[in-house]
Image: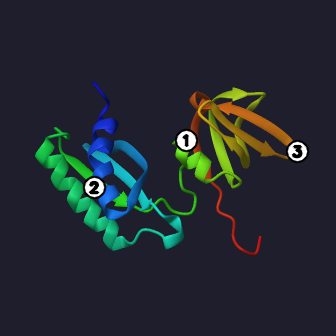
Amino acid sequence: MGTLEDAIEKLAEPVLARMGLELVDLELGRTGGRLLVRLFIDRANREAGGVSVRECGDFNLALGRLLDVEGVLQESHVLEVSSPGLDRRIRKLRDFRRHQGETVTVHLKAPRDGRKKVKGRIALADEDGITIEAQGLSFRLRHDEISRANLEYRFEDE
């Protein structure tokens, strides 16, 4: 049996695909004693621009109804949907591949060579892990070593 995250993602993916959107991240937490389900979505074709507030609202309504009908959430909950923002989290292999060449900050589950965090350019992303280039060094990280990874937004004049 899968996790609650898996069940929510399984219901969300087809709805997002029909809307030309994709799931960037999914977080579960607690707020005021209720389950907090937070989804970050974006346009599948990023060249077409970002996701709009209206699209976030439409998806929230569609997913909320689907979660109720399917009975996935058995407790009082809050459903939040938003864009991933400038420092978007990347978590799937497809995300690392899509952002190859861009700068990320990677937080490690355990220190490696005295570092708990690595910031650099994604040089390679494959099924085994990612290679980050930083300060003339190359770091090969397995996916299971990564706690969290976020893009570092670079302003045009930098």
Give the quadrant of residue 28.
Answer: top left
Distance Cα–Cα, label 1 vs label 3: 24 Å
Dot 1 corresponds to which residue? Answer: 93
Q: Residue at x 32, y 31 (%)?
A: 3
- The residue positioned 18% from the left and 45% from the top of the image is 76
Give the x, y percent position of residue 31.
Answer: 31, 47
Q: Secondary structure at mark 3?
A: loop
Q: Secondary structure at mark 1?
A: helix
Q: Nearer the viewer, residue 7 or 113?
A: 7
Image height of 109 relative to 44, above or below: above
Q: Quadrant of the N terminus?
A: top left
Residue 120 lies left or right of residue 150; in this view the side is right
Depicted 142 relative to depicted 27: above or below: above
What residue occupies the far top of the structure in this picture? 1
Return the residue nearer the eye: 32 or 68: 68
Q: Residue at x 37, y 63 (%)?
A: 20
Q: Quadrant of residue 73?
A: top left
**Residue marked by disc 2:** 15
The residue where tag 3 is placed is 136
The x and y percentages for residue 149 are 59, 45
Q: CA distance from mark 1 to mark 2?
A: 21 Å
Q: Amino acid at mark 1?
A: Leu
Residues tagged 1 and 2 counted as in contact (Cβ below 8 A):
no
Nearest to the eye among marks 1 and 3: give it: 1
**Quarter of the figure with residue 106:** top right
First reached walking from the N terminus: tag 1 or tag 2: 2
Report whether 130 appears left or right of 114. left
